[in-house]
Image: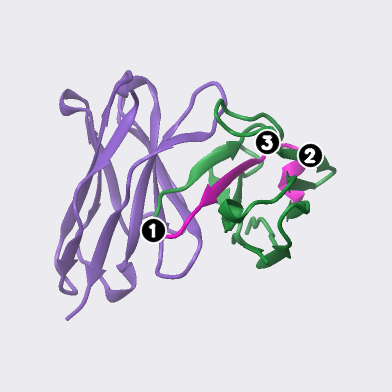
Amino acid sequence: SYELTQPPSVSVSPGQTARITCSADALTTQYAYWYQQKPGQAPVLLIYKDSERPSGIPERLSASRTGTTVTLIINGVQAEDEADYYCQSADSSGTYRIFGGGTKLTVL
Amino acid sequence: EVQLVQSGADVKKPGESLKISCQGSGYSFTTYWIAWVRQMPGKGLEWMGLIYPGSSETKYSPSFQGQVTISADKSITTAYLQWNSLKASDTAMYFCARLAAASDAFDFWGQGTMVTVSS
């Protein structure tokens, strides 16, 4: 079965840079997407098509790809960034969507 | 303004049926896929399936195929997620989300519907 692998947790101090990775073989043929979810809220789209930001998402959030690994980068981490982050992609046919297991970002 | 408004929380007993809803507004409901996403307590997001309200074409995750039914009524711009016989393991928050055509991203989400199945 197809899986997206994320680290369960990442911790950074305020003002530092957080990097959250997401890897899977099928990422070579499909785009990656990133969502932020805060407790008790619905997810919010942060990044689409590997590295594009929707309007309203701050520039300190970005993403990159290296082979089968995509990375969400949050520069100048703030307390408000503490949340769960999910990558999402599709299987090689593009039919079935899938989410990574999620990464809890803790701001120390 | 694009909005997806979901039905309220529900508590059911095992074996009962349930249909939850997701009403879209502020956009052309029939020309965007709608997804359903499950989040079990304390766990991650799981994609369940998609429906295209314009034609009612559906796509299901293999994990949920046969376990739920996704439908839509375009006359009232509403998508549905239905169970015929609930299990305790169906206890979860369920989100609907719009799939943007250009970006292929889930760009707008409903507020979620909490389903609790308990005897």
Q: Which residue is mark 2?
A: A64
Which chain does tag 2 point to? Answer: A
Write the residue at 56% across / 52% down: A80
Which chain does tag 3 point to? Answer: A
For the magenta stretch, what is the residue range?
A24-40
In the picture, residue B33 is in which quadrant?
A: top left
Asked if the residue at tag 2 contacts the one at tag 3, i.e. Cβ–Cβ closer than 8 Å, the answer is no
**Which quadrant holds the C terminus of chain B?**
bottom left
Q: Earlier in the sequence, mark 2 or mark 1?
A: 1
Q: Which residue is mark 1?
A: A40
- Residue A73, compared with residue A101, is above or below; it is above
Q: Which residue is mark 3?
A: A31
Mark 3 belongs to which amino acid?
Answer: Tyr
- Element under label 1? loop
Estimate the spatial distance between the alpha carbons at disc 2 and disc 1, rounded to whole Å: 28 Å
Estimate the spatial distance between the alpha carbons at disc 1 and disc 3, rounded to whole Å: 28 Å
In the picture, residue A94 is in which quadrant?
A: top right
Q: Earlier in the sequence, mark 3 or mark 2?
A: 3
Mark 1 belongs to which amino acid?
Answer: Gly
Residue B26 coordinates in the image, percent (x, y): 30, 21
Estimate the spatial distance between the alpha carbons at disc 3 and disc 2, rounded to whole Å: 11 Å
Residue B88 coordinates in the image, percent (x, y): 28, 75
Write the residue at 45% across / 70% down: B42
**Which quadrant holds the N terminus of chain B?**
top left
- Residue B29, compared with residue A67, is above or below; it is above
